[in-house]
Amino acid sequence: MIFADDWERNFGEIFKDCIPPSDPSLYVCCPSKTDPSVAPEGDENLFVLVPFPAGVTMTDDEVQQYRDKTIALIEKNI
């Protein structure tokens, strides 16, 4: 788990302002590390959960920028 520095702002942006969080929190999980049945032999299963407001419309460019931001956050913390 990677938590936003400002937890209240993070939740406010998601639930009150309905905008993508400027400093997102993340849940990163690799379940195949403990359960090999969730991925083909020799492979891994990785997922990233980013709490995000419902109904947000983003352009392809905005999605790519947010994806890059998320990957950079993972790289910084893991």
Image: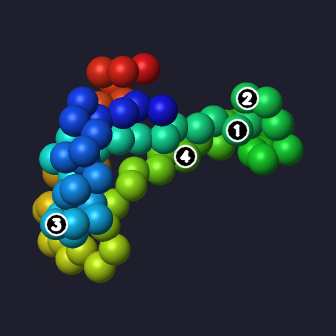
Callout 2 environment at 10 Å: few (<14), some (14 to 19), or many (20+)? some
Three-letter code, disc 3: Asp
Disc 4, SS: strand
For image coordinates 40% across by 31% down, the residue present is 2
Q: Nearer the viewer, residue 22 or 61?
A: 22
Q: Is residue 54 above or below residue 13?
A: below
Mark 2 or mark 4: whose residue is earlier in sequence: 2
Q: CA distance from mark 2 to mark 3?
A: 37 Å
Q: Residue furthest right?
A: 37
What's the mark number on residue 17? 3
What's the mark number on residue 31? 1
Q: CA distance from mark 3 to mark 1?
A: 33 Å
Badge 4 is on which residue? 47
For image coordinates 65% across by 43% down, the residue present is 45
Q: Are marks 2 and 3 in contact (CB under 8 Å)?
A: no
Location of the C terminus by quadrant is top left
